[in-house]
Image: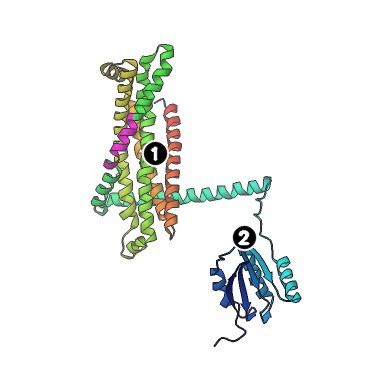
Amino acid sequence: MPSSDDPAFTVETGPDGQVLRFVGGLVVASLGALERPLARFRPEARAVRLDVSEVERMDTAGAFVVDALARRLEAEGVAVEIVPGAEARADLFATVRRSRPEAEGEEEPPSGFLPWLRDVGEETVRMLGVLAGLLGFFGLTLATIGRTALRPRRLRAAALVHQMQETGFNAVPIVSLMGFLIGVVLAFQGSVQLRQFGAEVFVVDLIAISILRELGIMLTAIIVAGRSGSAFTASIGSMKVREEIDAMRTLGLDPMEVLVLPRVLALAIMLPILGFVANVMGLLGGALMSWVELGISPAMFLTRLQDNTDVWHLGVGMIKAPVFAVVIATVACWQGFQVGGSSESVGQRTTAAVVQAIFLVIAIDALFSVFFAEIGV
């Protein structure tokens, strides 16, 4: 049986608004009974009176609860009046309201040279840690490849063929379209600029060197990083969340051989093929636009291509392809193994994998360009 000291309230509706009439004892020991009813209370009028004149006992905690209710209703646009019923209680409410802390403002970030230097140092240490982890995983991948080369039967051929289809054959349409459009754009923009000097015929050299040496393989690698790299990270990350990788280790299976090796080898095999497809489609698009825009016939385009384009331009692009493939697959698989225990972590790691893979592809392409320029290729 509830005692007379148990707190409660009733809601009355009149012409002047609603009245919440509290009874019992509003003391700290019994306020838990009012927490949910007060949280569910939604006023039906634009004016509410909180009447505590019939409350038998009330301490600071009780006044705090009533004042908190009044503040919530005021924030919702309701006119609130507290009826204390006694001068002592009116003083108690005034004291509680004065003592309530104001909302804390956001702390301004520290400024100056030393905080900036500290932030730079922390970010540098974090990036070095990421680089060390990635290099360690790359070394583990190379060790797995070497171990499998000595014992070829450990290679899972079915998984390799499946990954070749997913990363290679299924990507042919988007890579072909990209290469064709790049050739069209190069031919059109090149013709606009070269026409000013009467050197329209050199647009063939521009298209051939740009696509075969740089753009064809680099843009293919970027597309593969966004398409296949994200798929690698999401797939391995989802397995990490579902603890399937731990189950593999329990069964005596090496996740590097089961998950990483087929993906790395499949991408290393298929990216040069995709790069070659992009080169062919780029030249086809450039030839078509040169014919339409400059009147250079396909036969003339082909003759100019054979006479003035060194085969090493194609060779430079093909040399880069396996390197890009290994970097993309390694980064994507490593990020997959870094996934935590939530689906949100899968999305974060997938984004990081794509960004890091694309950045490394561009950086390595720049190093290749400097290297080949220095050796005269």
Q: Residue at x 52, y 48 (%)?
A: 127
Q: Where is mark 2, residue-wise?
A: 75
Is 64 placed left or right of 44 in the picture?
right
Indicate the position of residue 233 as horizontal and vertical percent values. 38, 51
Q: Which residues are magenta?
A: 169-180
Q: Amino acid at mark 2?
A: Ala
Callout 1 environment at 10 Å: few (<14), some (14 to 19), or many (20+)?
many
Q: How is the image coloured?
A: rainbow
Question: x, y percentage for residue 309?
Answer: 33, 21
Give the residue at x 67% y 67%: 81
Any part of residue 136 in sight? no
Residue 364 seen in the figure: yes
Between circles 2 and 1, the one closer to the viewer is: 2
Q: Determine if the magenta segment contains residue 5.
A: no
Q: Position of residue 377 (x, y in %)?
A: 39, 26
Residue 128 higher or lower than 369, as above or below: below
Task: Look at the image and tell me in which quarter the N terminus lies.
Answer: bottom right
Q: Quadrant of residue 375?
A: top left
At label 1, which amino acid type do we have?
A: Ile
